[in-house]
Image (cartoon, rainbow, N blue to C red):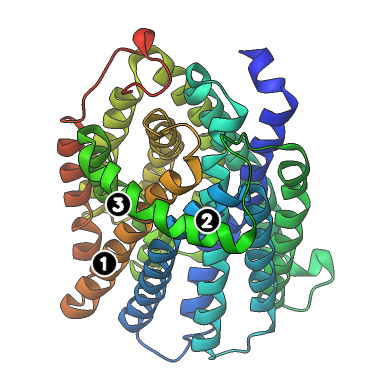
């Protein structure tokens, strides 16, 4: 195991998770929902700001879902997955830094910049995910995928911890106010993201089954290949069932990540407690993601995912009756134990289904399903909260996504880990 995790391409690849997880923690899960509700929507009811946050996330996910497969196909034909990883990273980091310039009450500008930053984040993730098959052998997918998520939890958690101290005690850093500290945190995320993405950009090399095409030829070939890939997905029982299952359950995971802080605020919990709970998720998630990577190699990726989904369903049902910060902390610990596991094992499970030389476009479909699903969850939670006036019902509705996703995953053809080989069902 140690040899695998110390190989230079593997370390460089995993460091990209360390890099972009700063956006996922400090911005997406942490300060943006807080700042969006309390600073950029300071004069509107909580249910309205929840609805606006849900719409912002949903529209962004729709854009990414429509874009991912074709961009992935073009990247494969042009041998440009690493280049596009760099491009989306720059986009995401630049838009994140620009959030520091948005004034109080200007929720629309904040939403637009956050949407653009999210496109950079998810677009970069598509090519990062697809490069798993270039840095690891099939038998190493579960372990290496878990390693990436583990470094992501650790790196994102470390920067978030510093940012949290900046916001809670701005005077220690010579910062004028908590609001100014939040804005500086956005800038720190941008710098962190760019800096730690450099090893992946300069060290990781994608394997190509054919010589890369010129940009114009790659675009034309990408469109043709995309139509062919649609046919392959429809004809592959395992691929189609897995993507449908993933469509449901990852929607629930992403919705909880995006809406948890908003839910805590709606229940009247203190901002400092919510930030501390998010930090707990990060540092519990580091060893848990490594554990699930090991577990997937022992019992199979599907079994590991199902365990995580059962836990998520229980968490969502319990959250309906949540009424104390202590309980919120308890749920944060439980989520930290499974969040990285369901994400990393889903990536390695899917990686075994991807035909050789088509990682970019097939992971484009993978990301398309994840983002298309993320259209439903935030909009569902936001709309239920707006219509019912009850944030608890919004959270309860998410349980259905885990149940349906798990039931579909049970129907995906499965082979024991010891018999798996490249291209076999996981």
Tags 1 and 3 touching, CB below 8 Å: no
User: Which sits earlier in the primary sequence, circle 1 or circle 2?
Assistant: 2
Q: Nearer the viewer, mark 1 or mark 2?
A: 2
Q: Is residue 22 above or below residue 415?
A: below
How far apart in space, not on screen, are marks 3 and 2 (Cα)? 30 Å
Mark 1 neighbour class, 10 Å CA radius: few under 14, some 14 to 19, many 20 or more: many
Mark 3 neighbour class, 10 Å CA radius: few under 14, some 14 to 19, many 20 or more: many
> Which residue bears the numbered disc 3?
252
Quarter-wise, where is residue 307 in the image?
top left
Quarter-wise, where is residue 245 in the image?
top left
Mark 2 neighbour class, 10 Å CA radius: few under 14, some 14 to 19, many 20 or more: many
User: Which sits earlier in the primary sequence, circle 1 or circle 3?
Assistant: 3
Q: In this rendered view, identify the residue nearer to me: 46 or 212.
A: 212
Q: In this rendered view, identify the residue nearer to me: 156 or 318.
A: 156
Quadrant location, the C terminus: top left
> Which residue bears the numbered disc 1?
381
Q: What x and y, as percent, mark residue 124? A: 58, 54
Q: Is residue 274 visible?
A: no
Q: Is residue 24 visible?
A: yes
How far apart in space, not on screen, are marks 1 and 3 (Cα)? 10 Å
Residue 385 in the figure: left or right of residue 336:
left
Residue 354 in the figure: left or right of residue 119:
left
> Residue at the location (68% across, 46% down)?
158
Q: In this rendered view, identify the residue nearer to me: 8 or 283.
A: 8
Q: Nearer the viewer, mark 3 or mark 2?
A: 2
> Residue at the location (33% across, 83% down)?
48
> Which residue bears the numbered disc 2?
74
């Amino acid at each position: 195991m140690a040899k695998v995790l110390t190989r230079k391409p593997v370390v460089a690849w995993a460091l990209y998770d360390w890099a972009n997880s700063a956006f996922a923690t400090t911005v997406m899960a942490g300060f943006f929902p807080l700042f969006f509700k309390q600073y950029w929507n300071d004069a509107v009811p909580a249910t309205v700001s929840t609805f606006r946050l849900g719409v912002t996330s949903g529209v962004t996910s729709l854009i990414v879902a429509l874009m991912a497969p074709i961009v992935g196909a073009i990247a494969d034909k042009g041998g440009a997955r690493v280049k596009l990883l760099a491009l989306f990273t720059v986009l995401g980091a630049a838009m994140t830094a620009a959030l520091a310039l948005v004034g109080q009450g200007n929720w629309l500008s904040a939403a637009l910049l956050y949407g653009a930053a999210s496109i950079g984040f998810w677009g970069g993730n598509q090519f990062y995910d697809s490069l798993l098959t270039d840095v690891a052998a099939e038998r190493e997918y579960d372990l290496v995928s878990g390693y990436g998520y583990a470094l992501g939890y650790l790196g994102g958690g470390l920067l978030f911890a510093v940012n949290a101290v900046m916001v809670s005690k701005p005077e220690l850093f010579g910062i004028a106010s908590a609001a100014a500290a939040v804005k500086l945190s956005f800038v720190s995320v941008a710098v962190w993201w760019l800096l730690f993405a450099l090893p992946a950009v300069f060290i990781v090399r994608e394997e190509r089954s054919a010589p890369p095409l010129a940009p114009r030829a790659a675009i034309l070939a990408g469109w043709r290949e995309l139509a062919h890939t649609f046919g392959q997905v429809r004809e592959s029982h395992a691929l189609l069932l897995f993507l449908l299952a993933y469509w449901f359950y990852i929607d629930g995971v992403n919705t909880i990540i995006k809406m948890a802080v908003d839910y805590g605020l709606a229940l009247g919990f203190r901002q400092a407690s919510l930030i501390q709970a998010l930090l707990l998720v990060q540092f519990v998630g580091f060893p848990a993601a490594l554990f699930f990577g090991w577990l997937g190699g022992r019992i199979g990726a599907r079994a590991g995912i199902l365990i995580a989904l059962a836990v998520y369903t229980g968490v969502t049902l319990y959250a309906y009756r949540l009424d104390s910060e202590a309980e919120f902390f308890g749920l944060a610990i439980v989520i930290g134990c499974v969040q990285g596991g369901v994400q990393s094992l889903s990536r390695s499970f899917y990686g075994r289904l991807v035909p050789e030389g088509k990682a970019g476009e097939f992971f484009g479909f993978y990301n398309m399903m994840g983002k298309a699903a993320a259209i439903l969850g935030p909009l569902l939670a936001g709309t239920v909260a707006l219509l019912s006036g009850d944030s608890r019902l919004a959270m309860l509705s998410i349980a259905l996504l885990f149940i349906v996703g798990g039931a579909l995953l049970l129907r995906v053809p499965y082979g024991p880990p010891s018999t798996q080989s490249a291209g076999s069902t996981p």
